[in-house]
Amino acid sequence: MELLTPLLRSSAVSECFSDTATLQGMLDFEAALATAQAGLGIIPPDAAQHIAACCHSHLIDSAALAQAAALAGNLAIPLVKQLTALVAQRDAGAARFVHWGATSQDAIDSGLMLQLRQAITLTQEDLNRLIAALVQQITLHQDCVLVGRTWMQHALPTTLGLKLAGTLDALLRYRQRFDEMRSRVLALQLGGAAGTLASLGEDGDLLVTALAVRLQLSAADTPWHSQRDRLLEIAGWYAGLTGTLGKLARDISLLMQTEVAEVAEPAAEGRGGSSTMPHKRNPVACAVILAAANRVPALVGGLHAAMVQEHERGLGGWHAEWESLPELVMLAAGALHTAGDLIAGLQVFPQQMQHNLKLTGGLIMAEAVTMALGEAIGRQQAHQLIEKQCHLALAQQRTLLDVLLEDSRVMAHLTPQRLAVLLDPQHYLGSAQTFTQRVLEQASLLTAGAKRYE
């Protein structure tokens, strides 16, 4: 389905999981394994040099490898065979030390970790880009008042700044989780046939440390052949992020509806058009993000199920990860990249927001009147009274102000001038500005802290 990659998996992260990258990840493991073993005197140094010289994906016959994997049960077994043959062409003696003491899962899992490390680095760049775009849009539109909606209905006034700050606040938490999990989840896999490294005698533990340093991965305290929580943590982070992006896309697509028209996706030639309707401007970016949010939960559910593995090496569960995890990460990363473009170029229409605030004839401000009147007659009694007046205004197709001005029970406690103020959305925003500024301050602190460590 490569035809859909530019649409659904547009991030550079997708290249991290190409066939070439998958092969190179395992080959990087094999080269580093041999080099580390030579450094510890486990294999001859010249053997390690010959092995490393052959660890390049372009030297591998990938078509033959794929066919052989169908019989072998995984990619590493035919890869090691091809690598051994390549090394033998250079030095027959060196070929004896290819994949020395390791097992196929060591190569596959460690290679995957190298792919994930690159993917995570690229993801961090896109996450930072989206955070910066949100900060910019919030700063520009933090005082822009629009209808707040609950259960898809007009509720109370809010600000676009606060609406976007909710997403930014969530993304800042994902950024913190990202920083916390990185060293924990990116771990070397090296356990040998059954997780004991018995084939390496007393050198096994030393090799784990040396190889982890060489590959710049964490040295796991134990092999994790059948303990898959690290991969699930990565998947869970991407899945949660995708859900947050999905909520953002859902809101923007709803705000883009013709009847609402408060925001729009960035305009560009050929973007969001229809094959038959010239006037259409479809929310393409939102569709991409929502598609990812729709698909990712099933993928992460499969990875949860795959955790139940047998004894020291899993049967089927491990295999289920091979396509599910990369696909999940690519979809999530594609959604993130798309969201960055969407927010950076988001178009905002304040005049339409003002128009929509007036659609209910002041009913959106009923709570403000209720609270003011409640100070005199009690909240519950005020609620019942204003609710009846709202129903009357709807039935008679009049504004709430006109109806309230005719009610002696209301006018006994509130003046016309006071009612005019209470029915002004600009005067009923509560702590929206405070909440928004708090998130902007957190974003400033987090991004400043990140720059110190880059």
Image (cartoon, rainbow, N blue to C red):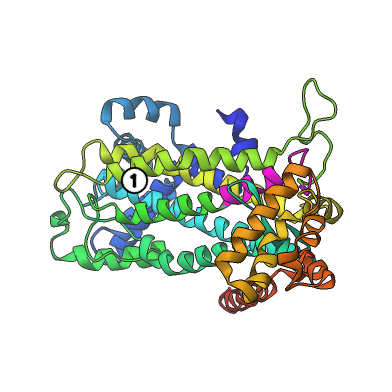
Q: Quadrant of residue 206?
A: bottom left
Quadrant where the C terminus lies?
bottom right
**Mark 1 falls on what kind of element?**
helix
In the current view of this chain or complex, which residue is farthest to the front? 408
Residue 209, image x, y percentages: 29, 68
What is the total number of numbered labels drawn onto the structure image?
1
- Please give the name of the residue rendered at 77% of the width and 49% of the height, measured from the top-left corner: 263
Q: Nearer the viewer, residue 361 or 22?
A: 361
Magenta residue check for 259: yes
Q: Nearer the viewer, residue 27 or 319?
A: 319
Residue 74, image x, y percentages: 30, 35
Q: Which residue is mark 1?
A: 108
Magenta residue check for 269: no
Residue 302, image x, y percentages: 34, 40
- Please give the name of the residue rendered at 80% of the width and 59% of the height, measured from the top-left corner: 406
Tell whether 268 sits left or right of 79: right
Residue 395, image x, y percentages: 73, 42
Q: Quadrant of residue 280?
A: top right
- Please give the name of the residue rendered at 59% of the width and 79% of the height, measured from the top-left corner: 452
Compared with residue 79, is residue 406 higher up or lower down, i.e. above or below?
below
Quadrant where the N terminus lies?
top right
**Residue type marked 1:** Ile
Q: Can see residue 129? A: no
Bounds of the magenta span?
245-263
Q: Nearer the viewer, residue 20 or 395?
A: 395
